[in-house]
Image (cartoon, rainbow, N blue to C red):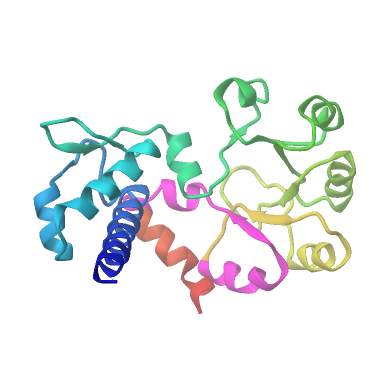
Amino acid sequence: MPQLNQIRERRTSADEVFDHLYQEIISLKLLPDTKMSEVEIASQFEVSRQPVREAFSRLGNLGLVLIRPQKATVVRKFSSREIAHARDIPLVIDTHSQLVQRLGLDGVHLHDARGLRDLRRDFGPDPIIGASAGASRHDGMAAGEAGADYITFGPVAETGLGAPALAEAELFAWWSEMIEVPVVAEGGLTPDLITALAPITDFFAIGPEIWHRDDPMAALAQLIAPLAR
């Protein structure tokens, strides 16, 4: 019985170390090329080195670390696709549908519904196809009928890029009530607009709102703060 308890304890310790390191790696708290010491991690978790070795082995099997005998184990370098997939985030390219299969992406976003039906036929049911519909209920419905997995409406506020028609809250409310295809709000998003649209939209497409700021992470946190309330 003592031996069995030791095995269980060791497995539990390995799971704990693995779970912690896995989250640190996929969240990029541990950056690529970071060296990981068995001794230091064992001391941190107050375990022997064996559970740490087991955790390293599991991380290596997932392709997250490089285990080099007699040298430090290091976090391996990742492509943006690998980082996205590790966090269950689909990677969708804008417009260039021919690159989806070539690059192993999850789908494509189109700026209108032209060619969408043919693309869905060629892609089959699995790859994601999204389409922009501006502020047009008709264009959104046409894209949905052609096989789009989601529809984006926007801009929802002035963006300084010409003077396109704005997608009003009433459009999102109607769509959410009448149509099953997920709807996405984009363009000119602010915390107040996210607060107002959150009950009637499925997702928000965030771009210039954060990438044009000096600190994108801080801008993102501020922008989506209403979703945490």
Q: Which residues are magenta?
A: 191-216
Tell me if 86 is positioned left or right of 8 in this view: right
Which residue is nearer to you in this view: 33 or 166? 33
Q: Is residue 116 visible?
A: yes
Q: Which residue is drawn at the image coordinates 48% and 35% (left, top)?
A: 81
Q: Which residue is drawn at the image coordinates 10% and 60% (left, top)?
A: 43
The number of numbered discs placed on residues in the rendered structure image is: 0
Q: Which residue is drawn at the image coordinates 80% and 24% (left, top)?
A: 122
| Up-down relation of residue 1 to residue 59 (above or below) | below
Quadrant in which the N terminus is drawn? bottom left
Which residue is nearer to you in this view: 88 or 132? 88
Q: Which residue is drawn at the image coordinates 55% and 24% (left, top)?
A: 103
Q: Residue furthest front?
A: 1
Which residue is nearer to you in this view: 206 or 86? 86
| Up-down relation of residue 78 to residue 221 (above or below) | above
Tell me if 80 is positioned left or right of 113 in this view: left
Q: Is residue 102 magenta?
A: no
Q: Is residue 157 visible?
A: no
Give the image location of residue 134, x and y in percent.
Answer: 74, 47
Q: Is residue 192 magenta?
A: yes
Tell me if 188 is positioned left or right of 112 in this view: left
Which residue is nearer to you in this view: 177 or 160? 177
Tell me if 99 is positioned left or right of 138 in this view: left
Give the image location of residue 89, x and y in percent.
Answer: 53, 47
Give the image location of residue 216, x and y in percent.
Answer: 37, 52
| Up-down relation of residue 154 to residue 45 (above or below) | above
Q: Which quadrant holds residue 148? A: top right
